[in-house]
Image (cartoon, rainbow, N blue to C red):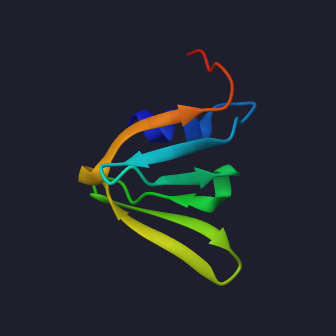
Amino acid sequence: EEIRKYQLHAPFHPFKLVLSTGTEIPVEHPEFLWMPRGGRLVMVSRSEDYYEVIDLIHVVSLKVSEHVSD
């Protein structure tokens, strides 16, 4: 729910998904992130021919480039 909030925020601010391994996955544009409703996976496009599939259980925090209010 929090990830979708940042994805849909207008204007969009890039953010990073921080994983349990410490890896940070940048989300540079809202269309680069896909989350099926009710699912536990998220897909993040990193380039035209590369994307990451992440189990949401491994997302421990979000890093937002600017303050985003509700």
Residue 10: % across, % down: 71, 30
Q: Nearer the viewer, residue 32 or 47?
A: 47
Q: Nearer the viewer, residue 69 or 46?
A: 46
The quadrant in which the N terminus is found is top left
Where 29 falls versus 8 (above or below)? below
In which quadrant of the rendered view does residue 47 lie?
bottom right
Looking at the image, the residue that sits furthest to the left is: 57
Left or right of residue 46: residue 21: left
In which quadrant of the rendered view does residue 70 lie?
top right
Q: Residue at x 28, y 52 (%)?
A: 58
Looking at the image, the residue that sits furthest to the right is: 11
Residue 61: % across, % down: 39, 36
Residue 42: % across, % down: 41, 60
Looking at the image, the residue that sits furthest to the top is: 69
**Number of numbered discs on residues:** 0
Looking at the image, the residue that sits furthest to the front is: 22
Q: Residue at x 43, y 45 (%)?
A: 18
Q: Nearer the viewer, residue 17 or 13?
A: 17
Q: Residue at x 55, y 44 (%)?
A: 16
Where 66 falls versus 62 (above or below)? above
Residue 2: % across, % down: 42, 33
Left or right of residue 15: residue 13: right
Left or right of residue 1: residue 11: right
